[in-house]
Image: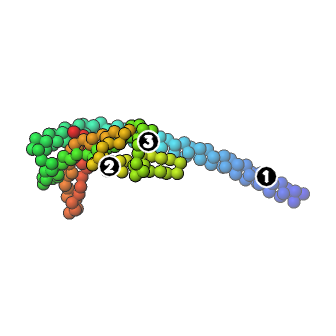
Amino acid sequence: MESNFIDELLREAEEKEQKLSREFADLMLIEISQLEKQIQSNFEQAAREREIIQNWALSRNSSLASRLDFLSKKLEAFIKETGEKTINLPNGILKMHKKPDKVEVENLELFLKNARPQWITVIPEQVKPNLVAIKNHIKTRPIPKGVKVIEGEVEFSYKLNGVEDGKEEAGAGIKQAG
């Protein structure tokens, strides 16, 4: 009988331990669920904060961009008034330069009927105009049929000079079509 009593006590202890383990495991699952929800909440809050910061930066920078555009147009008017192509200043360089002409094939069939071999590039199963060769041809000869020349515009740009850690730095230049 003693062995039965001891066996029964051991069996009860094992059942209690097993029950405690199941309860503990369930509690761990609850904690995992709460942690996952907190992680998701943190990501959502961070996304909302990023949006707030982005909107703040956009509103601040829109007025700065307007001022930058205004100053750039003033510089463009200044260089046009002087008639110079390039003006070197202590804090940067102002330039007026003509963009290169562009060539556009308006009517591919008409162009291909009259095209010289150097004016086209043949890629297996594909034939397309060689715009560089056509542009070079147009410099000294008539425009091929089916081709349109889009004249390059005069463009204003500036380059800023800056000093950072003793090194000269090229800043962002603004380019505007004239």
Which residue sits at x=21%, y=60%? 168
Q: What's the residue type where badge 2 is placed?
A: His
Residue 71 lies, in percent from the top left, at 17, 41
Q: Name the amino acid, label 1.
A: Glu
* Mark 1 element type: helix
Residue at the (27%, 37%) spot, across then down: 62
Q: Spot the residue most to the bottom.
A: 166
Kindly identify which residue carries mark 1: 12
**Disc 3 or disc 1, which is closer to the eye?**
3
**Residues under numbered marks 2 and 3 in contact, where contact means CB atoms less than 8 Å apart:** no
Three-letter residue code for mark 3: Lys
What is the residue that sits farthest to the right in this orientation? 1
Query: Label 2: few (<14), some or many (≥20) within 10 Å?
Result: some
How far separated are the C-alphas under marks 3 and 1? 99 Å
Can residue 158 be seen?
yes
Residues at marks 1 and 2, CA–CA distance in whole angstroms: 100 Å
Q: Secondary structure at mark 3?
A: helix
Q: Which residue is mark 3?
A: 113
Sort mark 3 into few (<14), some (14-19) or many (20+) by Cα contacts within 10 Å: few
At a point 61% along the width and 44% down the height, the residue shown is: 30
Within-10-Å neighbours for mark 1: few <14, some 14–19, many 20+? few
* Sequence-first disc among 3 and 1: 1
Q: Closer to us: mark 2 or mark 3? A: 3
Q: Nearer the viewer, residue 162 or 158?
A: 158
Res. 82 image quadrant: top left
Quadrant where the C terminus is found in the figure: top left
15 displayed left or right of 5: left
N-terminal of the pair, mark 2 or mark 3, is 3
Residue 70: percent from the left, percent from the top? 19, 38
What residue does disc 2 label?
Answer: 137
- Residue shown at 27%/41% (left/top)? 151
